[in-house]
Amino acid sequence: MGLFSKIAKTFDTVKQGYTSAIILCAGNSTRFGKGLENKQMAQVCGKGVAERTISVFEKSKCVKEIILVVRKEDLQKYKELIVINDFKKIRCIVVGGDTRQNSAFRGFRHISEKTKYVIFHDGARCLVTEEIIESVLKKAVEYNAASAACRAIDTIKWVDENGLVKRTLDREFVWNVQTPQAFETKTYKASAYNARQKNIEVTDDCMLAEKAGFKVKLVDTGRENIKITVKEDIDYAEYVISKREGHINK
């Protein structure tokens, strides 16, 4: 039985309420390589990165609606993508802001009035699975805020501005944070309001909750759920997908 099999079987018993997913596809792909296409549209085993990501949330039984946050210049591409794939859960497409934080805020404004839980996910994390979504949401129901993550396996050094080591962190308590990140709607709303009032800038949604004094539960969802950032990541994603589909021996 796989890592998430038991979770998936028991999740239906959790009274999660209406859940909205905000998929963030508004990044500029600056690290993906000059002259290369938008990484969201890059092909992985014959299918676009963002297209793969949206498909997983479309299939997820616990997600009721999807809000896409995209670059203005990509609006038409996503409209065509929705038609081609016959996606049914897309509530709307929103133009993103100048930062990830602002893009998330813009997406949040468009969720349904009945949304009880909201999930934020990077469009470039196309290796997410329905089981990962469910496991993170289950913990958000329990703790009000939760995120996909995996334990650090490398030794982590804390350095100064010159790259000189100040101290070594205890690896036992260091995690690499991923998405999806899920929140009870009121918790996220309070966190976002706090950030706006205090001019707090963050790099992920969990930090909003942390800065507002909420506790965030990390869920060990393994190491495969990478974010496509550089072109070499495409090779890894294709390997993982081929392995999942049985084309490569596990």
Image (spheres, rainbow, N blue to C red):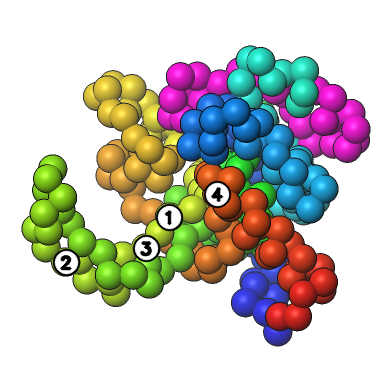
Query: Is 206 drawn above or below residue 6 in the view shown?
Result: above
Q: CA distance from mark 3 to mark 1?
A: 6 Å
On the image, the x and y values in percent for residue 211 come to 28, 40
Based on the picture, tell me whether residue 28 belongs to the magenta stretch: no
Query: Is 226 drawn above or below residue 30 in the view shown?
Result: below
Q: Which residue is mark 1?
A: 177
Badge 4 amino acid:
Lys
On the image, the x and y values in percent for residue 34 come to 54, 30
Quarter of the view holding residue 238: bottom right
Q: Would you say 244 lies left or right of 226 here?
A: right
Mark 3 or mark 2, which has the lower sequence index? 2
Q: Nearer the viewer, mark 4 or mark 3?
A: 4
Say which of 158 and 170 sits in front.
Answer: 158
Q: Would you say 235 lies left or right of 182 here?
A: right
Q: Which residues are magenta?
A: 79-108
Mark 4 or mark 2, which has the lower sequence index? 2
Q: Which residue is mark 3?
A: 175
Q: CA distance from mark 1 to mark 4?
A: 11 Å
Badge 2 amino acid:
Thr
Q: Residues within 10 Å of mark 3 (few under 14, many from 20)?
A: some
Q: Which residue is mark 4?
A: 227
Q: Which residue is mark 2?
A: 168
Mark 1 or mark 2, which has the lower sequence index? 2
